[in-house]
Image (tube, helix red, strand yellow):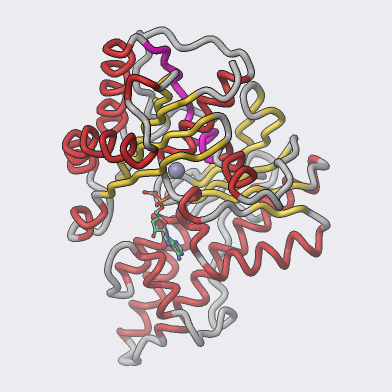
């Protein structure tokens, strides 16, 4: 049917996101984050995230329906993230979504979180009439604290291929871990950005993971950040052992450059190799100013059209899940049966 009213539930990590859309129009994007509770552990603690979702979900659903000016019983369908993500966290959202669907007698759509990031783009087109709808196929680079994935999206609702992903830490996780090494608080991304101001990105050439010739056969589009993190740790330790002060701005800028360089090198290579002149960015790491700057530079040079949704649609949110659900409905997809579970390692 046309323009379905869909409520989307996102609980794959530390954001409890409720989104409400009518077709491609965003009505509400309501979010609670348990980030502060994780800060003292230096990273997201799965158990803490799951408990926070349990507490926040009902208040967030109430806040979202009131924000959107709708009644819960008016929704046409529920969409929910069932993977990938933290399994306990996902289970809270999936359980709540099923209960809602049964109580309201409405269909439910179980959706993939990564594809949801791509689905968010339709909301941008609607919000800003100047933007043309995203064309397919497109390459999508999704970078957050939980994932680092490169997708080939031929069709949003039926043909998404995972080209590559991180084989160890996610890019955001690398920012968080390196921030910790440098004595900066969590989350690390914004902190690294802050101290990198004025730093020399070429001060130290930190390793770019999986970029050697020998990696190109099996890991052409995969990422690795744990070697980079170790390399920063070793450099800092040796500098301190030598009795010298660590040039924070230079180390932060050099580390950030290494992450961003490899992300964009592989994303642009995928566009070029596969003849797809479009790149969509998504995930919380997109907040990085240097990443945005270099993305513009590299895509311009390669003749690739670059899409960067507004940050509120890049970080984990329920609106992207609702938007993907609405797209599935409008494309005539059948709803999910109520027997699906949470799949923490669901591929794209
Ligand atoms: O998408 P997101 O909000 O959700 C989770 O993955 O939970 O992403 C959060 C991640 C964190 O790892 C954070 O350090 C990183 O995104 N991040 C950044 C920046 N802002 C947030 N990384 C680099 N530069 C930033 N400015
Ligand atoms: Zn995400």
Q: Position of residue 48 (x, y in %)?
A: 18, 43
In depth, the one of 283 and 135 nearer the eye is 135
- Ligand 1 shows up in the quarter that is bottom left
Residue that extends furthest to the front in the rendered view of this protein: 69
The range drawn in magenta is 106-117
Q: Is 111 colored magenta in this rendering?
A: yes
User: Could you tell me which residue is drawn at 69 percent across and 64 percent down?
Assistant: 296
Residue displayed at 50% across by 77% down: 253
Residue 29 position in % (x across, y down) = 41, 43
Q: Residue 320 vs residue 73: left or right? A: right
Name the residue located 52 percent from the left edge and 22 percent from the top edge: 4
In the picture provided, is 101 more to the left or to the right than 109?
left
> Does 83 appear above or below 129?
above
Work out whether 233 lies above or below 126: below
Taking 299 as reference, is 59 left or right?
left
Of the 4 image quadrants, the one containing the C terminus is: top right
Which residue is found at the position 35% from the left and 22% from the top?
A: 342
Q: From the top left corner, tell me how far across and down residue 331 is, in percent.
A: 64, 18
Q: Residue furthest bottom?
A: 244
Where on the picture, by quarter, is residue 64?
top left
Q: Nearer the viewer, residue 118 or 268?
A: 118
Image quadrant of residue 200?
A: bottom right
Pinpoint residue 239: horizontal percent, then vertical percent: 37, 84
Which quadrant: the N terminus?
top right
**177 in magenta:** no
């Amino acid at each position: 049917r046309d323009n379905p009213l869909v409520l989307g539930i996102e609980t794959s990590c530390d954001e409890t996101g409720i989104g409400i859309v009518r077709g491609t129009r965003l009505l509400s994007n309501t979010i609670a984050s348990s980030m502060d509770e994780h800060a003292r552990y230096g990273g997201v603690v799965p158990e803490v995230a799951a408990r926070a979702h349990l507490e926040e979900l009902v208040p967030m659903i109430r806040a979202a329906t009131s924000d959107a000016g709708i009644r819960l019983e008016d929704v046409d369908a529920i969409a929910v993230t069932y993977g990938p993500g933290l399994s306990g966290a996902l289970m809270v959202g999936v359980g709540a979504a099923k209960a809602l669907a049964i109580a309201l007698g409405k269909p439910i759509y179980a959706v993939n979180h990564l594809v949801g990031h791509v689905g968010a783009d339709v909301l941008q087109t609607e919000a800003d009439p100047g933007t043309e709808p995203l064309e397919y196929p497109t390459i999508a680079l999704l970078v957050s604290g939980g994932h680092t994935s490169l997708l080939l999206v031929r069709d949003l609702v039926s043909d998404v291929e995972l080209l590559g992903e991180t084989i160890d830490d996610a890019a955001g996780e690398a920012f968080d871990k390196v921030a910790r090494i440098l004595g900066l608080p969590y989350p690390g991304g914004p902190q690294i950005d802050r101290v990198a101001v004025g730093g020399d990105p070429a001060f130290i050439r930190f390793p770019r993971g999986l970029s050697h010739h020998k990696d190109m056969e099996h890991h052409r589009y995969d990422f690795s950040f744990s070697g980079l993190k170790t390399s920063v740790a070793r450099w800092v330790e040796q500098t301190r052992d030598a009795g010298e002060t660590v040039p924070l701005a230079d180390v932060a800028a050099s580390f950030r450059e290494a992450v961003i360089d490899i992300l964009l090198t592989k994303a642009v290579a995928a566009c070029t190799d596969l003849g797809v002149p479009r790149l969509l960015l998504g995930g919380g790491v997109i907040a990085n100013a240097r990443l945005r700057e270099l993305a513009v530079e590299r895509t311009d040079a390669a003749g690739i059209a670059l899409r960067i949704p507004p940050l509120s649609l890049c970080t984990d949110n329920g609106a992207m899940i609702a938007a993907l659900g609405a797209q599935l409905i409008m494309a005539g997809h059948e709803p999910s049966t109520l027997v699906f579970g949470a799949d923490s390692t669901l591929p794209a």
